[in-house]
Amino acid sequence: MTDPTAAEPDFAFDDEQLEFGRVVRQFLGRRSDQAEVRRLMATGTGHDPDVWKALALQLGVTGLAVPETFGGTGRGPLELVVVFEEFGRALACAPLLSTVGMAASLLTRLPADPAALRYLPGIVDGSVLGTVALGAGSEVDVPAAQAERSGSGWLLTGEATFVVDAHVADVVLLGAATAAGPTLFLAERGAAGLGATALDTLDPTRRLGRLRLRETPAAPVGEAGGARAHLAAVRDLAAVYLAAEQAGGAAFMLETVVEYAKHRVQFGRAIGSFQAVKHRCAEMLLLVESARSAAYHAGRAAADGSAELPALAALAKAYCSDAYVEVARASIQLLGGLGFTWEHPAHLHHRRALSSSALLGDPNQHRERLVRLLDGSHTEER
Amino acid sequence: MTDPTAAEPDFAFDDEQLEFGRVVRQFLGRRSDQAEVRRLMATGTGHDPDVWKALALQLGVTGLAVPETFGGTGRGPLELVVVFEEFGRALACAPLLSTVGMAASLLTRLPADPAALRYLPGIVDGSVLGTVALGAGSEVDVPAAQAERSGSGWLLTGEATFVVDAHVADVVLLGAATAAGPTLFLAERGAAGLGATALDTLDPTRRLGRLRLRETPAAPVGEAGGARAHLAAVRDLAAVYLAAEQAGGAAFMLETVVEYAKHRVQFGRAIGSFQAVKHRCAEMLLLVESARSAAYHAGRAAADGSAELPALAALAKAYCSDAYVEVARASIQLLGGLGFTWEHPAHLHHRRALSSSALLGDPNQHRERLVRLLDGSHTEER
Amino acid sequence: MSVAEDLDRWLADHWDPELGLREWRAVLVDSGWARPAWPGEWWGMGLPPADAAEAQRVLAEAEVVGPPSTVAVNLVAPTILQHGSDLLRSTFLRPALVGDHAWTQLFSEPGAGSDLAGVTTRAERRAELPGDTWIVNGHKVWNSGAQDADHGLLLARTDWDVPKHRGLTCLVVDMRAAGVHVRPLPQMNGYATFSEVVLTDVRVPAEHVLGEVGGGWAVVNAMLANERSLGAGAGTVPVPGNVAGRCRREAAEEAARAARHFSWYPQRYGRADLVAAARSADPLVRQQIARVVTLARIAAWSAGRARANLRLGRVAGAEGSLAKLMTSELARAAAVAHAQLAGPDVLLGDTLTAEILLSVPAVSIAGGTDEIQKNIVAERVLGLPKDPTSDAHVPFRDVRRNGPAEPSGAELSGAELSGAEPSGAGS
Amino acid sequence: MSVAEDLDRWLADHWDPELGLREWRAVLVDSGWARPAWPGEWWGMGLPPADAAEAQRVLAEAEVVGPPSTVAVNLVAPTILQHGSDLLRSTFLRPALVGDHAWTQLFSEPGAGSDLAGVTTRAERRAELPGDTWIVNGHKVWNSGAQDADHGLLLARTDWDVPKHRGLTCLVVDMRAAGVHVRPLPQMNGYATFSEVVLTDVRVPAEHVLGEVGGGWAVVNAMLANERSLGAGAGTVPVPGNVAGRCRREAAEEAARAARHFSWYPQRYGRADLVAAARSADPLVRQQIARVVTLARIAAWSAGRARANLRLGRVAGAEGSLAKLMTSELARAAAVAHAQLAGPDVLLGDTLTAEILLSVPAVSIAGGTDEIQKNIVAERVLGLPKDPTSDAHVPFRDVRRNGPAEPSGAELSGAELSGAEPSGAGS
């Protein structure tokens, strides 16, 4: 990471990956069009369980990065990058980030733990939803709770907020303080003393919640005192997936605006023939393609198990956050009054862009992390 | 300063001030045109002593902010803002910032000190050049030297760099450590152990030097231990004048580019009819007019002896620095290849803009100062 | 005797804070003191501007309730006074000032936003119909207060064979007439301040043409100029908040009713006041606070400089457009600062921060986009040449334009998004 | 037998690092191994591209000296091979490859920068003069290496009565001919890499027309395409730095001589490598370092993605233009970082930081301004409509253009500012 001009192998998605992206796009076009997004964002759960089942069973989206042992296909993070980009385009309302991006990522890191065998197959077949309490910042939130022994088990007490899809998660993973240090625990939905409230969020297409644990029975997962490294790794993966989602959202907005600029006539000309519009669109394309490059290469680092992953995840999350916000903002401007209506999808992307930029740490935080990782002066959690 | 939306009295220069600006512009047009700037920037002293004499005696530029007691007209900082704006337009090579903006400002604060009577009349009539060792940052550089008693006098040892016009200054004012705290001292050109070397500077139209003092005899000025407050006050005034100079330079570049864009034809049209050029020029005008507003109002605070001066000086220096750099950069871009030539004045403004942005503290430092002053948490030097 | 003495004496005789609002306004308006600069025959006193300003000051100091601050009073009434026939003046001026009539502008269309002169709402004269009538068909958007309006000031195309600016006519439309359909148009921030209005075979009597047939562009420009001059500080007597008296109370209630759709208006400017008062230990956030404070101060100074120069009789450039660009930049910078100050709480939906972030995009669109302002600044102040292509000199019939087949709401643009706002709602 | 074995055997027989540079190059060029993909009759071997690449690899691994990396070899020679008559090929190809002839491009003019097809240098055919001669008059700028050039490839207008792109012709000009006046054109950073060239009644023999009369635009585009493809990694055998042998030493000296005017070229890209290696305790500077590292990584990834897609046979958009925009943005960000890292030392004149700050402005101008690249991206990738005004379809005589009376040097624009650069000088 010290020489940014050092040669790296050229990378582009292969035909199979591109084809998979098209399949996902078509599926979402059928099952999660704009009207459906509008409908779901007004419901309590915020997603359609039947669509989720179909995504799991027909497209195998839930098992892409889960080993075959647990029912997945073991394709890996790059294929998930493809999926997240498509979900970002469509603003699809589904527990993808929480269940697949976070919970499955975490359990997959612990193949020997009984929790992996117990929950991963259910996640893969779409019957189990999960989430991880990572906290809202770029540094993982451990411990989120205090753990105390109770007979042969553990009871957790504490609170975690901005937990993605907390309101529907069947299993919740979080770090809690023990004598051995912060340790991972898993609590099941409905456990005693476990409360999950959905927050009123800026982005109605992604649900965040607050978890409250009061002497809630929970099972330790992974090695005692090992929470920090696992959570940091999941934070990096989730940041990469978010970056891909952001790139997809930005690409959709750009395409929408370009289409509009080709057909919208003012002063007797298509507005896209005015340099002010034309150049702004060119700048947006540069942002979109750059965001894609960043997300894809961070995904590649994840797929390769590269030591650069933390740095590239920070880089991608920072860049893609800014790019999506800027593209959404520019799109609204170019759409004029239309872009300011509730009716047009622009504002949903604007909300998503602002929210995703803050989720898991804002761009400033990630840039600071990136430089610390460059310095080598950063005590990473792993 | 806490409510930025609070009403303030409307302010614009009066007709007399505008007329004075026109007189200065005409004078510089005659005596300091572009050919003359090119000639002077290649000389050793970097200015024309005859022109300086004329500025002092014919236009009274040197005495604008000096009380009548010392030969000046006592008009005050606002008139100097007018002059600095014109000097910035013309890139006039002259010891205005050092002698008038700094040394005269400092001595004028100490009317009871013998140094004021001894040197101010010479500064006003153009026979004495002076400077103040303020350091290059936004926080004043005290002490720049160590002072030791020697009989009835003092000997100074130390070093100060980035001192404006150090190579031609007849008198140098600087802070030096004494038992009573940092105290102002004045050393005369030619004093034993005083060396001044001109630095090779990015901006050839303004000279900076390094001062070396080795047991150099120097006279204390003002109260013992009082250096910090005086130097901070001069720093604020000099920052306001620099801001005005920056606004003037930016205005000149914009006018140059607009003239070019009206007449330069490409693709069968004046390039100024292309929105890419047109909008960039409009953005530059906003920067120029905003820079003027900032410099004028900081000048007004200086003229009024307002407690807001430190904050407004920081605000103006930060904004005008960024505005000038951006306008110079955009101008070069719009001028195309022509703007990249040595022959065109654009690069001299680019050099001046980059340098002035760093001199007396860069925009980031001044913004931080501004917020600290807003906070009230900043222990200002006065 | 001075104007102030005159007015003081009149107030002593007539002003009673315990009067009903409507009753008091009728007294005030009929006396001429509500609009003393207007001509004597039209509810004014024909006073010179300086005297009228003095009267205004006296009324303000005494906290006397004046006409409401509405589209009707601030925008429509001066336009009718300037351009209207005596019939229109006698019909509409007094009810507007008294507060009996509410008005809305019917200018922008889905296909005509930045290019307002490109409206395609069609008005056809049918002299054969009873009373000499115009038939109007078209689709208007960004109409503020249309739901509650009694009358609409409509910009329609009446001649398709002349260049675009010359085929337009202003008509006064009865918003309760058959064929007028008003639909709220919710915005991204969840408010529904504006409506769209579909007009289907709406009948307008010929005497309700405002200004000349074919002279609508001049009328609209006069109205927009009134709107801009309001921004420079003119206006009506402020409505006091916490003072005593039935009349003031009713006026405050009326203002609150009018403002309920506009409570987000201050937020679209970014609320620099809150940023300036905020504190942060993060050096990056501190930089952003400094930027916001800087832009806010400079915006105020530049506006003051423009006012001072105007008072000194110096020629004005396009200060309004420059100020609008600065307002946009300030609002954007402030939104960034709010997001940074909120930290993770920016994820929440029911906060003032959220309302700011979702309202700021309006400021660079409404009332003429930033792009339009830059054209104005570059051409009028800097003298840069206009775009060589222009549709301004060919018959409108031959101008390429957005098709009528476009779906409702899918082709809007926001030249008129600003509309008029109750005083105090903007900043 | 494979190409590599063939070449290995040939090298074993002929390659001697102790040969003189010119002597060795003559052997290499005459053997066909210098340009094995070229046709056999023109100093090549007619090998398919894959075999030629293999030969290139073998030569590079053995550190065998090849033709110089010059305008003559990289740009002019392929253009002459493609468009030139047999006379031009036989006259100019071998001396270029051997390193005997230096060339310069004579394209841009003071009045034709971004609008290169608007050149007004005039070439008139005078069949009555001895040997059928063209007479050239005009003013060229941004000519790199013109002082040392033997020949210039000139773009001139030969027909003023057809649209601009169709009245242009390419001519080979003897730079030592009477009437050719070369003047260095110092840049803002103090270097004088470029010249301007004034041509006054310069005679060019008719057989020195390159391509068709009236077909100059195609020739120039082919040449600029060669220039762009070089950026994608094609090129000649690199000249080793510290290796033994007279031949290599002389080649290195030759390269150093050629590079002396170009030492600032890496600086114009902003030297992101130095920013990435820098450290700072200031959180604001750290943000800027992160931005530079981010842009540099992304620029490399996007370039790699374009190459990978090309290899996979996927249709390319305007990746070159996007990459150039990214390069500009990166250079600007890096310049800001350098200034911040330098602190007050940015005030000094003789530093690498200063050279970076004074060179970076070139990158968004040279080789097509950012504005031109944005047009290309918007029109070719996004499919946005072209500007409706265009001078491309009227006789050039009727096109408005910059007057000939404009002073020397006062009307330059930088489409050609990049020119060609010795390999290794750019990055």
Image (cartoon, coloured by chain):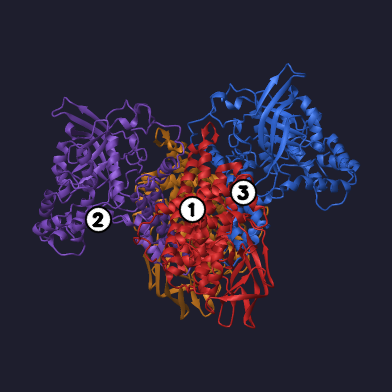
Chain colours: A orange, B red, C purple, D blue
Distance, label 3 to label 2, CA atoms, is 65 Å
Camera-side residue of D179 and D108: D179
Camera-side residue of D328 and B370: B370
SS assignment at label 3: helix
x then y, percent, for residue B166 = 63, 64
SS assignment at label 1: helix
Residue A14 visible in the displayed image:
no
Residue A56 visible in the displayed image:
yes
The quadrant of the image that shows the N terminus of chain D is top right
Q: Tag 1, which chain? A: A
Identify residue type, mark 1: Gln
Identify residue type, mark 2: Arg
Residue at image mark 1: A246
Q: Tag 2, which chain? A: C
What mark, if any, has residue C260 been given in the picture? 2
Q: Quadrant of residue B75?
A: bottom left
Identify residue type, mark 3: Glu
Q: Tag 3, which chain? A: B
| Rendered view: D66 above or below B160 | above
What mark, if any, has residue B36 been given in the picture? 3
- Using residue A341 as the reference point, say whether residue C105 is left or right of it: left
x then y, percent, for residue B74 = 46, 63
